[in-house]
Image (cartoon, rainbow, N blue to C red):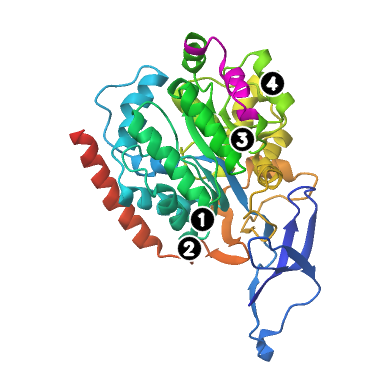
Amino acid sequence: MSLYLRNARFIDWQTLKIKTTHIKVDKGVSGGISFVDSIPDLDAGDNSARVIDCKGKFVTKAFGCGHHHIYSTLARGMPAPRKIPTNFQEILTYIWWHVDKCLDKDMIEASALASALYCAKNGITFIIDHHASPFNIEGSLSTIADAFDKVGVSHLLCYELSDRDGAGPREAGLAEHERYLAGGGQGHIGLHASFTVGDELLKSSVDLAIKHGTGLHIHVAEDKADQVACLKDHNKRVVKRLHDAGGLDLPQTILGHCIHLDDEEKEIIRSTGSWVVQNTESNLNNNVGLANYNQISEKIMLGTDGMHCDMLRSAKATFLSGQPVEGTGMDTAYARFRNVHHYIQSAGFKGDAGNNLVVLDYDSPTELTNENFLGHFIYGINSSHVETVVAQGEVIVEDRVLKTADESEILAYARQMGDKLWEAMKKS
C-alpha cells in the first residue's frame, strides 16, 4: 500500500526551499519520495493507497541523533549517589558506572523501548547509540535493536568496550560486537574513552572494525583527565594515540565530544576527515567545558549523550552556547543538526533515506519562507510541533500518538524496570 501526503508544504532539508505539493512516499530501507499532481481517489474505491491530509502543514526530512546512551533512560529521578561528585571522573564512578553495572536484560529492553518511543515522537527516525552494561553484555545489542525495530526507528549500535571492569567484561564486549556484526547487525566498535582502554583492547577493536567494514565510536577528551592519563600512560595525546592505532583511518569512526584538543590533534582530525559529535547539554551538565568546533572540522554532527531524546532542543543549545565560544550562527547550528544524514550516507549505512519524514503542525504568527527558515528553526519550531512521523515509508507516529506499539505499556514497563534498577543500585 502506497503512502501519500496530501496538501503538504514541503521544506527541502538541504536547500530550505518550500513548495506546496502532494507527496508520494515509497516504502523500504532505501525508499524515496516524489512530488505528484494528483493522488488516488479513495472515495472511488481505490484501496491501494493510504492518504494523510497534511492540510497545509510543513513536511520535511526526519531527524537523526549522532550519539545517544539509551541505558540512561531509567536514570531520570533516580536516588542521589552515595557521594556527591566533585569532578568528571567521580560523576562516572558514582553515577554512570554505578547505573550500568546494575542493568539486566529487561532493564536494557525497557530503556531501549522508552528511548525509541521518545525519539520517534520527537521526529527522530535514526539513532546512533553507545551502550554499556558490563555484567549483562551478551545479546544486549540485539535486545536494543529489537526494541528499536518494534517502535520503527533505524539504528547504528555498539557496545562500550573498556578495561575498567576487568578481562571478563572486556572479552564479552568484543564477543558481543563479533556476534552482532557477523549476524548482519549495523554498528560500530564502541569504546568508552582512551583512559579506560589499554593498548591490547584498542588494537583488538581496530582489527575488529576493519574486519567488519566499520569504524570506532569513542568518547575523546571529554574531560582534561582523559588527556592527562593518555600522556602519563602512553606519552602522547588522545587523538594521536587513536591515529597511531589506525582508528582514524576508518571513515566510519565517530569521535565524541572532542573538547580538550590541541592544535596538532585538530589538524589530525581535519587531515583524516574524521567525524566529531557535539553534545552541548551533556558537556554543560558535567561542567567539562565547551569547544570551538569551528577550529576542528566542518564534519560536526549533534548528539544528546543520553541527556534526552530531542534533537531540536540540542540544536538550539548548540546555537545559544556556541555564540560566546565560537560565534555559532543559526546556519551553523542547523548544518550540524543535519550533518548526521551526511555522515550516515558517506559511511554507507542504511535506514536514513528520503522516505523518513516529519509533519510539523507549526502555526506561526509570522510567515515561514526559505529566506527566514533558520530564524523559525532556532526560535520557533520545537518537538511539540511534531505531529506525524514516517520512517522508511511507514507511519510510526500519527496525530502525536505512536502507532507501532502501545505507549502506555512501554512506559509502564519502563517504570517497573526503573524501580527495579533503583533497588539494585541501593544494594550495590
The local secondary structure at tag 1 comes to helix
> Which is more foreground, mark 1 or mark 4?
4
How many labels, in total?
4
Q: Residues within 10 Å of mark 2 (few under 14, many from 20)?
A: many
Identified at 43% across, 56% down, the residue is 147
- Residue at the spot of label 1: 121
Residue 395 % position (x, y)? 57, 66
Residue occupying the far bottom of the picture: 44
Image depth: mark 3 or mark 2 in front: 3
Q: Which residue is mark 3?
A: 253
Q: Position of residue 202 (x, y in %)?
A: 51, 27
Residue depicted at x 58% and y 41%: 211
Choose mark 1 or mark 3, whichever is in front. 3
Q: CA distance from mark 1 to mark 3?
A: 28 Å
Look at mark 4 in the image and give the residue it sits on. 268
Q: Which residues are magenta?
A: 233-248
Vertical placement of residue 4 versus 317, above or below:
below
